[in-house]
Image (cartoon, grey):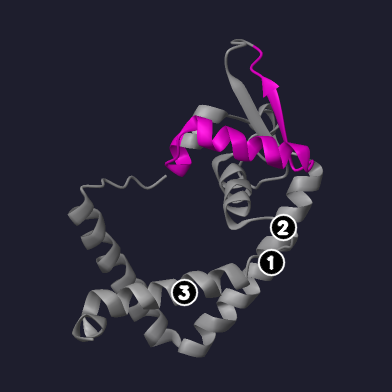
């Protein structure tokens, strides 16, 4: 059919292939991409132990759930469900804020931090291998084109992205 040859259908299929490949490199069994992403965001935004550049007090307190949700561009209720699953696995801990009991704080546990380091290393190795195979010039072009294309999609969708 003619519609199967359109650029948008080709792009849809390519992105679907990429999604399946991305799922295949999920860094650890038993942890979904969204759960892994939540652990990464928690570590990056300051709710994990042993993070370089984070004051020890901030690490111990964790991050307010609403701040984590904002940083991940997700709703607090959706994120709260994922946090509950990660808490049941022993990877995160929720606590009440010392000054405002309405505020829930989230932080990585030692087990969560250890898993994150291991999983990140495994994912990083696979991604770097793929990028190395592309070469420096094609990798630079890939990032440039993906950034441009994403910006165009965001503009078409009326999305304003703020980098955290």
Any magenta on residue 148?
A: no
- Circle 3: is it few (<14), some (14-19), or many (20+) Cα within 10 Å? few
Q: Position of residue 13 (x, y in %)?
A: 37, 77
Q: Name the residue tied to disc 1.
A: 121
Label 1 – label 3 distance at C-alpha? 20 Å
Label 2 – label 1 distance at C-alpha? 6 Å
Q: Name the residue tied to disc 2.
A: 117
The residue shown at (33%, 80%) is 141
- For the record, the magenta segment spans 70-98
Instruction: State which tag comes first along the sequence, 1 or 3.
Output: 3
User: Tag 2, which secondary structure?
Assistant: helix
| Along the viewing direction, whichever of 132 and 85 lies nearer the viewer | 85
Any magenta on residue 95?
A: yes
| Along the viewing direction, whichever of 87 and 160 lies nearer the viewer | 87
User: Tag 1, which secondary structure?
Assistant: helix
The residue shown at (26%, 67%) is 149
Q: Quadrant location of residue 15?
A: bottom left
């Amino acid at each position: 059919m003619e519609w199967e040859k359109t650029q948008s259908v080709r792009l849809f299929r390519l992105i679907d292939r990429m999604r399946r490949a991305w799922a295949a490199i999920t860094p650890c069994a038993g942890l979904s991409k969204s759960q892994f992403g939540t652990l990464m965001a928690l570590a990056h935004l300051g709710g994990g132990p042993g993070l370089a550049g984070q004051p020890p007090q901030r690490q111990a307190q964790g991050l307010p759930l609403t701040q984590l949700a904002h940083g991940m561009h997700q709703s607090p209720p959706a994120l709260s469900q994922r946090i509950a699953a990660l808490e049941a696995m022993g990877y995160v801990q929720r606590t009440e804020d010392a000054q405002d009991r309405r505020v829930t704080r989230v932080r990585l546990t030692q087990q969560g931090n250890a898993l994150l380091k291991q999983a990140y290393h495994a994912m990083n190795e696979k991604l770097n291998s793929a990028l190395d195979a592309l070469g420096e010039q094609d990798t630079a072009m890939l990032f440039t084109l993906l950034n441009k294309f994403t910006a165009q999609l965001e503009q078409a969708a009326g999305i304003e992205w703020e980098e955290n």
